[in-house]
Amino acid sequence: MKWTMAELVEKALSARRESKHIEFKQSFDPHSPREWCELIKDIAAMANSGGGIIVFGLDSAGEPSAASIEAILAVDPADIANKLAKYTGPVDLQFDIRKIKKQGHSLAAFVVEAAAIPLVFTKPGTYDIGSGKQHSAFGMGTVYFRHGAKSEPGTSDDIRRVVERQVEYIRRSWLKGVRKGVQAPSGAEIVTRRLVGSHGEHAALASTVRAVKDPTAIPVRLTRDRSLATGTFVHEEISDALFDEINNVVEANRVLAKGQKHFLLGQPVYYRVYAERHHVQQADEDLALLYTAGVCDFYGPSLFWALALPAELVAEVLTYLFLHPKSPHIHHLIRLGVLLGPDFCKWLFGRWHDKWKRYAQPPAFYWAFKKMIEQTSHANPRLVAARTSLTSQIDLGTEGSVTVKALLDEPERAAGILSRLCVKVFNGSNDLRTVTRALDYLAYGDGVMRRSSQISNAVKASVGTRDAGDPSDTEGVD
């Protein structure tokens, strides 16, 4: 719900406790770094949560504290914006400071508008608490929201509400534009005429429609033949599906990440994006972020991104795994290595053998890779990478099961099933994650094998002479 300033002030003055959109502060010292950090956190959280009001001079029960608020009223709004930008980078945030009264006591009110783009802290908000100790009001990379009367780090649900709020704003703007567009000005008329070709014949299936009286207006020819088109007519069907456009989710993550190579919206949303991967139209840097997240954050299906990226960007992710072999994510490298062919397997295993040949107990993935290399001598590399066999059945949960052989022969079918199961993971069926990884290799393994020379050469060049990293086993392979 969007309130006017007068409505927000009225609600705050009648409120008996703080809430998502109302914050009380008994006093404020503009010379205190602690109070500035806490205020900045509250402003950001409130803006990210759709806006609200912060009232100075009231206690937690909404009663006047009798504290002087002249100092806060004397603060220039530009100074507040600058202090906020110090921790979030440049911001486009609207807020107003006004003097109000309750029970004869003067109060100061900050009315904060909703942020179109969530405010992310790019620097930590720390202040001295004495004895040489520092306290952090908020950390770098955090996004704060209002949870009841508290300003706390955001959750996936918070981010989802921000996206929905902005989508609703865009929807209303578009509908308003549509209403304006279909209301022709008084006296306007629509004139149609048949176009005549150079030899006097009528041009089939083409007409000019003019919605204005200006004879110089540029006509737009509506035709299926691009070579005959004289302009561009864009049609968008306004429906719920339009506003579920998956690219908006990717864009939202890019804005929130602010250069970090992380998918901040979480694993469930990543799987939802992967389910709609064919509709993702983003720059290479965003696809690389998705690939990095799928491999290094969630150890989930991700080969579609690898096939869409230049070999050098794929190599960056695989090089990171080589230098930072954490389990289970390192298994993406050995599974992909099988698809990249015997020469790459020989090179990778050789580098690991040189590092651990003197160790009594090499890491588990070293032996797993050695076994997989041996299996490729008598089995399809896609089966080895998917860790299955030709006679196996893949359990699809409520969809029953399907033979591996059928999917090996029909990668498009494997891709279709993968999309449906990714939606189920998004909805909470985490037990299907292992199946989605297997389907990923069955669906896109051939594509990786066709690019094996490019990717393997790029990885070798990226790694260079650097030694393999020490393993960090954080969890088992599922």
Image (tube, rainbow, N blue to C red):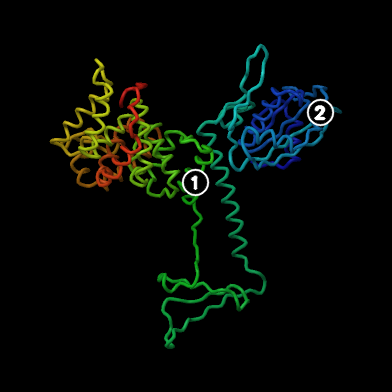
Q: Left of 219 or right of it: where is 467?
A: left
Q: Is 391 placed above or below 242 here?
A: above
Asked whether 280 or 31 is in front, the reply is 31
Question: Is residue 160 something that shows in the picture?
Answer: no
For residue 293, what is the image quadrant? top left
Q: Which mark is residue 248?
A: 1
Asked whether 457 or 49 is in front, the reply is 457
Q: Which residue lies furthest to the top in this view?
A: 131
Q: Left of 179 or right of it: where is 65?
A: right
Question: x and y percent of residue 349 in the render?
Answer: 24, 29
Circle 1: residue type: Asn
For residue 362, what is the image quadrant? top left
Q: Is 378 placed above or below 64 here?
A: below
Looking at the rendered image, the disc whose residue lies closer to the viewer, 2 or 1, is 2
> What distance separates the C-alpha of mark 2 from that of mark 1?
43 Å
Residue at position x 44%, y 85% from top?
Answer: 198
Q: Left of 169 or right of it: where is 329?
A: left
For residue 461, what is the image quadrant? top left
Q: Could you say whether the residue bearing mark 2 is in a helix, strand or loop? A: helix
Question: x and y percent of residue 212 in the render?
Answer: 61, 73
Q: Quadrant of the C terminus?
A: top left
Asked whether 226 or 82 is in front, the reply is 82
Question: x and y percent of residue 338 in the render?
Answer: 23, 36
Q: Could you say whether the residue bearing mark 1 is in a helix, strand or loop? A: helix
Circle 2: residue type: Ala
Question: x and y percent of residue 194 in the render?
Answer: 48, 81
Residue at position x 38%, y 37% from top?
Answer: 316
Q: Earlier in the sequence, mark 2 or mark 1?
A: 2
Q: Left of 343 or right of it: where is 281?
A: right
Which residue lies under the disc numbered 2?
A: 71
